[in-house]
Amino acid sequence: MKKLLLIGWKDVTLAFRDRTALILMLLAPFLLTLGLGAVTGRFSGASSSGISHIPVVLVNQDGGSLGNALVTLFQSTDLGGLVDPTLSQDPAAARQQVDTNLADAALVIPQGFTDSIIPAQGQTAPVPAVQIELYTNPTTPTSVGVVKTILDDFLSQIEVGRVGGEVAVSQLVQSGRIQVQQAQAIGLEIGARQANASGQSTSIILNNTTSRGAAVPFDVLALLAPSMALMFLMYTVSYGGRTLLTERNQGTLPRLLVSPTTTIQVLGGKMIGIFLTGTAQMLILILGTTLLFHLQWGDPLAVVILVLAAVFAAASWGMLITALAKTPGQVSTIGLAIMLTFGILGGTFINTDNMPAWFQLVTKITPNAWGIDGFTTLAMGGGLPDIRTPILGLVCMGISIFAIAALLFNRRGLTER
Amino acid sequence: MSSILEVKNLSKKYGDFTAVNGISFAIQEGEIFSLLGPNGAGKTTTISMLSTLYTPTAGEASVAGHNVSGDPMAVRNLIGVVPQELALYDELTARENLVFWGQMYGLSGRTLKTRVQEVLEQIGLADRAQKRVKTYSGGMKRRVNIGVGLLHKPRLLFMDEPTVGIDPQSRRAILDSVKELNHQGMTVLYTTHYMEEAEELSDRVGIMDHGELIAMGTQTELTRQVGENDNLVLHIDENQNGEILAAAIRKIHNVLKADVTDHTVSVIVPEAEEILAPVITVANELGIKIRSVDIQEPNLESVFLSLTGRALRD
């Protein structure tokens, strides 16, 4: 066992002295996470805590019950962690804040908005429709999407209330329970109640409640960071596997095999080297994103266990690639192809949740899919019991793939090919 | 003296190609034994089998009584290997390389530290031990490569062409270190295609060609095989036909052999001076211009030439 660790540690040392490898192992996933985080609006505004504090400027020129209800909704404690509203009187100034990236969106509620939906008492003539203006920052699409969804939800409830009120009043008149003359007053009352209800709650649920009942804020980086880390983990394991063939070419592998070291010890040491390098890479990325982006990965113990399982599964793929290839160049080529393929299948670039069942089944051959599943569960507040399936899947994958790789090495030999 | 290495009918085949064909020899404890032969003679394959890296196709070999196929781990503990190609980690320092390889040979703690320092001083790199190997010159890398093979004080050291591609100064240092190691009691199996190295170092020499051990013995014994004959070497112009000249020289009285290599005609005769005049006459008659003439006393080169009809460099 001591020799396994010595060989493994030597490989870790060599990997971390290789500048190119370091760039691809650590810098590339970090920068991609950073870039994608910026694209999704994760780093916009004064806040650095992600889409939980979206800066929105509210201009309420309406002053009616619905306009006030909308402002109240944005200022409600329910959305307190998600949006960070400020009030303004000037629509142009609000738009200016968006243009200068001080806000992700400006919401202008024009005068007469409430009256356009709930006519004033005694008014019988039709009122022209008044539209709310949502002025958005195109560089923060995710944040804008959240604001728009909140607004749509509010308007949808208003519409439901308006239609519901009309139906209710109509039914009351038809059944003879109220007089036609009472209809407008009752309709206004229903509308006012609905408006108040709209301001008190929202159906937008971006806070997730865990099995333990604690609410955890959603962070888009909780999806991006593990996705990138897992994709570049596949690079690391193929790099690790490549060193076996490189050592064969440069003579250090034959030299190892004429020392009192068994083939199993050499292979095991290599596997440990890949495992340690991959683990170090993942933990550095996790630590880095935690410190720099304030990303919450979840239960630390569960994260570490999931990292170990994911690296084990990925490392076995690295050994299999090495067993199939004949030259270090082939390992690089196959490794790169697998890194990208697994990235796509595993959900790094596309959301696979909406894919057909057969596609989702195929994704399970990748450590990425299991890993992303586990990491997002933990980031949403899950614990170790919630990621039993991903861990089991990764460990089973690691054992079976490594067994195939060992069989191939046994058949082909390490030095005589 | 007892044999530390015994080789019997050892063969290695790759498909239809026979790299080593039934060689047999033994090396006594404390001896320097050289395998001399041109590139492709089978020297490296032989060392690879003896060091347990390759499995022999046929035959057997044992180190201090341990069969290389049946008990490879015992053999590996007794031997040290200095491979032909540099087998080091460029990104590690010389000290880190030595420490790692020492650990692979089971050294640890104070023993490892002491041996690493001793070897660094032995190879003259103690003051540059903290530099990464990639910053070293070719000769310095060669010295580290040898140092790795010495760390665990092996009883039998295999050195596979350790002086290939290095400067004369480093080569001299390596040859001196081999002699020094032998004086300290280490048995050495040394392969080379340089006749001078085999002559300088070896107690006994085995000559290999095309996978076969074609001659073996002390230098005296080997040169005796070709008799006390001289080798008259004639250098001719590139556009001259050496074969015609060799054929004509073979007809001269007392000429035992005449072979052509590149633009050189080698003539084996009992006394070179005696046939020099007739040889020049024959060349003049054929219109072949002789640029220069060397007269060589019997040596391993002439033995190889005598046995194979080719020079070692072929």
Image (spheres, rainbow, N blue to C red):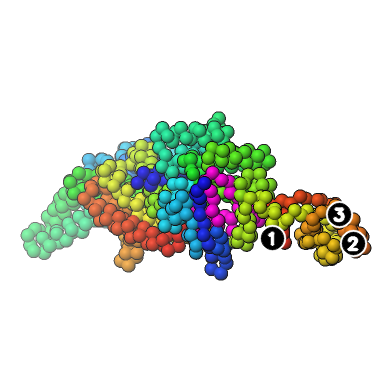
In the image, which residues are magenta? B25-54
Q: CA distance from mark 1 to mark 2?
A: 26 Å
- The kind of secondary structure element at disc 1 is helix
Which residue has dot 2 on it?
A: B282
- In reply to whether residue A72 is colored magenta, the answer given is no
- The kind of secondary structure element at disc 2 is helix
Residue B208, quarter of picture = bottom right
Which comes sooner in the sequence, label 2 or label 3? 3
- Given the image, on which type of amino acid does mark 1 rest? Leu
- Which residue is at 35% across, 54% downward? A313
Asked whether the residues under marks 1 and 3 belong to the same chain, the reply is: yes
x and y percent of residue B141 in the render?
58, 41
Which comes sooner in the sequence, label 1 or label 2? 2
- Indicate left or right for A262 with A201 as reference: right
Query: Seen from this angle, which residue lies furthest bottom?
Result: B16
Which residue has dot 3 on it?
A: B274
- Which residue is at 50% across, 62% downward? B59
Q: Nearer the viewer, residue A57 or A221?
A: A221
- Given the image, on which type of amino acid does mark 2 rest? Val
- The kind of secondary structure element at disc 3 is helix
Query: Residue B307: which numbered mark, if any?
Result: 1
